Image (tube, helix red, strand yellow):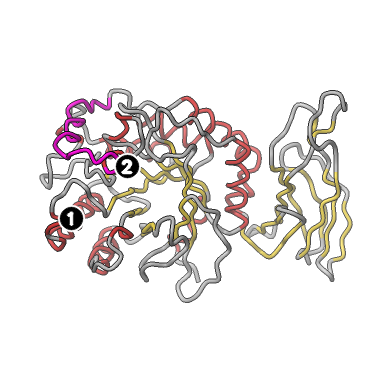
């Protein structure tokens, strides 16, 4: 049986990740301190130029809403150790002590609430700035505990904590019972997520964890054992989480749409990353790609939010999901455009789409984008269903098209 917070998390389906910190001013990704072995005192000078003058929480959150995202995850503190929030005396290495002079997390939470977006907090567990991380780990864990306690007590109800970095000390005692117990006391409805990293995707690292992570890797449909645990894939738009001025290797809208659909095929959420520039502006490519996702979600979001895996499989990547009301959503890949052969490219026109696992008696099937009713054949006893998947009308190409079945 799913706990309510996990069920609510799965229903949100699609989120926006935001990686932003001092490293964004350099524009070479979020690991540049470690990658270039920059001395801490030298790196700390970036704090003196961090004005956040271009950061508008309302603009960022509004963009996420236009994308069809229902939650966001902001890096309140990344591995560099700098906090975007007021640490309440724990450290002066935070945004209020910089020229920004503001609690940027408070602004983010306020904007999320206005737009109906659920705010989650990323918080590093690895810290390159704090000497205690290397020299006195117990003292560091006390600092980490108090830092997370601030996030749990100063910003009202939050959607969850998204941790990252335990993989840096795999044999250490991170005192997770203590940390997670504190979160449960203050935020009983918050998701607890701890990223297991590139080399250990999909692993449940602790009994209190509510979702496993698939960093930069396609999730798989998991067999549940004991407590039901959600799944989430986190994905960069190019090749870096933090802003990379020289990283032009952006994914296409097609790849992002396909990835979102295949995540839902595996019962997983997609968390798509934006890396704001040094003072908080959103890169134009990130903005455009996010808005493209929103155009697709405006048409097919119902299937993404409400559909769940139910063993309905088609040919190739095609698959089906079932909603709680009994509606069936069929995701069809690789459809062509119906149009003159002199101007259409690639696959053209319609095809038959066959699925297995549909035993409900189908009354009708229609495309969700234009409402067109489609012809079909069915052997309900065998679970076989075939319908005439018409091609996109000329002037349209949605990458993945979704048909909705009404069944008895």
Figure check: 125 above or below 101? below
Chain-order first, disc 1 or disc 2:
2
Q: Secondary structure at mark 2?
A: loop
Q: Position of residue 25 (x, y in %)?
A: 29, 29
Instruction: From the image, give the main secondary structure of the stretch colored magenta.
Output: helix
Q: Position of residue 290 (x, y in %)?
A: 52, 34
Q: Is residue 132 left or right of residue 13?
A: left
| Residue on which the image places disc 1 | 133
From mark 1 to mark 2, how far is it between C-alphas?
17 Å
Q: Position of residue 109 (x, y in %)?
A: 33, 40
Query: Is 40 a magenta residue?
Result: yes
Q: Position of residue 95 (x, y in %)?
A: 20, 35
Q: Name the residue: 29% across, 45% down.
A: 78
Q: Name the residue: 25% across, 49% down.
A: 151
Q: Name the residue: 71% across, 50% down.
A: 331
Q: Is residue 11 left or right of residue 52?
A: right
Point out the residue furthest to the bottom here: 226
Q: Which residues are magenta?
A: 34-52
Query: Is 234 a magenta residue?
Result: no
Along the viewing direction, whichever of 11 and 384 lies nearer the viewer: 384
**Dot 1, crowdedness within 10 Å: few (<14), some or many (≥20)?**
some
The disc label shown at residue 277, or none? none
Point out the residue furthest to the front here: 36
Q: Name the residue: 38% across, 67% down.
A: 205
Figure check: 352 above or below 311? above
The disc label shown at residue 31, or none? 2
Q: Quadrant of the C terminus?
A: bottom right
Q: Secondary structure at mark 1?
A: helix
């Amino acid at each position: 049986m799913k706990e309510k917070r996990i069920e609510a998390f799965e229903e949100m389906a699609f989120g926006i990740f935001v990686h932003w910190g001092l490293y964004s001013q350099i524009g070479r990704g979020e690991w540049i301190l470690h990658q270039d072995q920059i001395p801490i005192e030298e790196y700390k000078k970036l704090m003196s130029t961090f004005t956040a003058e271009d950061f508008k929480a309302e603009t960022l959150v509004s963009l996420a809403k236009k994308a069809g995202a229902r939650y966001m995850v902001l890096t309140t503190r990344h591995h560099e150790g700098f906090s975007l929030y007021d640490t309440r005396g724990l450290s002066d290495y935070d945004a209020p002590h910089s020229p920004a002079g503001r609690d940027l997390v408070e602004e983010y939470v306020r904007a999320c609430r206005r737009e109906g977006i659920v705010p989650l907090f990323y918080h590093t567990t690895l810290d390159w700035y704090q000497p205690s991380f290397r020299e006195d780990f117990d003292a560091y864990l006390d600092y980490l505990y108090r830092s997370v306690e601030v996030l749990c007590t100063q910003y009202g109800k939050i959607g969850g904590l998204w941790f990252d970095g335990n993989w840096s000390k795999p044999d250490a005692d991170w005192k997770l019972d203590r940390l997670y117990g504190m979160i449960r006391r203050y935020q009983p409805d918050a998701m607890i997520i701890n990223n297991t990293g590139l080399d250990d995707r999909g692993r449940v690292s602790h009994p209190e964890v509510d979702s496993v992570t698939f960093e930069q890797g396609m999730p798989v449909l998991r067999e549940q054992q004991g407590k039901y645990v959600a799944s989430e894939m986190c994905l960069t738009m190019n090749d870096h989480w933090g802003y990379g001025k020289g990283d032009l290797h952006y994914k296409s809208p097609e790849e992002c749409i396909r990835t979102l659909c295949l995540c839902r095929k595996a019962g997983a959420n997609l968390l798509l990353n934006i890396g704001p520039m040094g003072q908080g502006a959103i890169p134009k490519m990130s903005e455009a790609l996010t808005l493209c996702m929103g155009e697709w979600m405006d048409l097919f979001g119902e299937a993404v939010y409400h559909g769940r895996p139910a063993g309905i499989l088609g040919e190739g990547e095609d698959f089906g999901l079932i909603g709680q009301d009994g509606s069936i959503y069929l995701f069809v890949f690789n459809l062509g455009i119906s149009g003159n052969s002199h101007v259409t490219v690639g696959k053209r026109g319609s095809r038959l789409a066959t699925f297995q696992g549909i035993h409900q008696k189908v009354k009708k099937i229609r495309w969700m984008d234009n409402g067109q009713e489609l012809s079909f054949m069915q052997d309900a006893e065998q679970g076989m269903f075939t319908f005439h998947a018409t091609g996109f009308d000329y002037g349209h190409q949605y990458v993945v098209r979704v048909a909705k079945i009404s069944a008895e």
